[in-house]
Image (cartoon, rainbow, N blue to C red):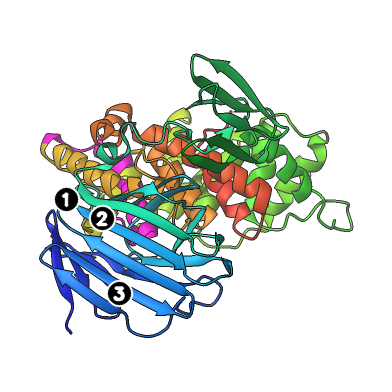
Amino acid sequence: MSALTFPCGAAEVAVGPDGTVTATLPGAAPTLLVTGGLLVHAADGRPLLPGPPEVRADEDEVELAWSTGALTLVVRHTFAVGWGLRVALSAGGEQAIDLRDPLLTWRTPDDRPAWALAAGAAGSYAVLPADGAGPLLGGVLRSGALPAVDPAGLHLGPVRLAAGARYVVQWQWDLHPGPRGLSRGRHPQVPRRLDLAVDEVVVVEATEDEALVLPDGLEAEHARGQVELSGVQPGRYPVELRAARGTTAYELRVGPPLETLLADRALVALEQPRTAAGIVRLADGDAALAVQRALAAAVLPDTELAEEALDLHTARLPDGDALDPRTVGYLCGEHTRTGDPALLERAERAVLVAASPEPGLGLAATQLCLALLLAGRPVAPVLQHLAGLAAAADRRASAAPLVAQASLLELEVVTTARRGPADGAAGSVRVRERVAALGGWLGAGLTGRAVRPLPVDQLAHLCAVLALLPEPAAAVHRTRWGCTAHVLAAGGRVSVLERVAWDGGPEAGPALSWLLLGTRAD
């Protein structure tokens, strides 16, 4: 039997003879769902029930059934309205059956952002368009539970089937015009944002008949069927809302203030080995930038130790004009700290020899131009050079490749205001289109978290770039997202701070540097 195809709005869903499903749209980037629809063991990917299924189909429905011993699995796809997906597990014997972690495969393209809420009785999933402007494939959990989601698919378990019992999971999928259409009015029992700053307040709906279970570290204020939740200290906090419809369970993550994390990272940076003269050798440029900003913020107990470490780091920088953008930002900060004009001149030369867009070039140029203006020097050569790099890149707006797209957006944002009316209008359109495409990596206003979390340094860089946008450009997509690009960036920034504090790792230093370069030093 060949694959059966069914319409879902403008999309086409194909169901193969083995039960595998794919979803595509017409156009240049058609794939919405690479493969899915099979129930497997999450630990090793083995089919839950081996062998080909028994297939029954008509014009708007297909049912696939597997049976082995006492366990029966039936997967039904219906297309009368949108795309309904029903998974039913049945235990037909006299003994209970325990399934540790059954997984419904659901793999989306790597170059499209995917966002999901996995909160037990509350679940949703969205495959966002590559250009950020087209329709998205969105699914909402109607019955059963979604305790977890990952790039491999949707986790159902653990599931315990009593003898003769059945467990059913139902999803409703459809094409939605945009993120706001999928998220409006859904999941009021879950906060719109799951990553919070300390003392930030989020609201959930909960009645007196529902039990809200909170750990120490979270505070709750009840009023008129709503609960205001806030975290008094950084951490990761499991939350449960037990109700007749099932248990909604999710994790609130509370990130530390930037100033607190900066002070901690700077103090660790100053614990490195010292020279014979007693001067700290800072490990790398990210450590130096952290110490520099902590010194400017007056959060270090030994300022002389920090100043000597920075002087030594600057003296040890490699010769030549080719410097990475984070080092350019560092040199601008050192010029501000010391008043040495040679540092500013070297930073300017480094930007002017840049041959193509690269991460941080626009961020560093923003700091460079400010320093040049304060020094009474022209910024036109820098901006003209960056505008030339952006024009030569000529990359169509898309969600991928993320680093290249975000790096180009930096230059477009920094240089658009300096162009003439015609070029400026075209530049504004390019900025708008690129922001639309990249906003999906931050959820585009949807509740939940990324199915494939970005590396924390890439996430930090993207947040810093979106924070560069002027207010009108940041607000352009409010109707589609339900929020501005600045709100997306602020939420992503909290996620970066929480992950750097909680996970650490080699990407933590660059991640913090991107946030610092996106924040003007005092």
Which quarter of the rendering shows the C terminus? top right
Q: Is residue 409 above or below residue 379?
A: below
Image spot of residue 364 (x, y percent): 46, 45
Report the span colored magenta: 397-421
Q: Please name whichever residue, 489 or 119, is drawn nearer the observer in this view of the structure.
A: 119
Residue topped by disc 1: 81
Q: Are marks 1 and 2 in contact (CB under 8 Å)?
A: yes
Kindly report the secondary structure that dominates the magenta region of the rendered protein: helix
Q: Quadrant of residue 435?
A: top left
Q: Kindly identify which numbered label has been placed on residue 84.
A: 2
Secondary structure under the numbered disc 3 in the rendered image: loop
Residue topped by disc 3: 20
The crowding category of the residue bearing disc 3, from other C-alpha atoms within 10 Å (few below 14, some 14 to 19, many at least 20), is: some
The amino acid beneath tag 1 is Val
The amino acid beneath tag 3 is Thr
Q: Please name whichever residue, 508 or 243, is drawn nearer the observer in this view of the structure.
A: 243
Disc 3 to disc 2, C-alpha distance: 15 Å
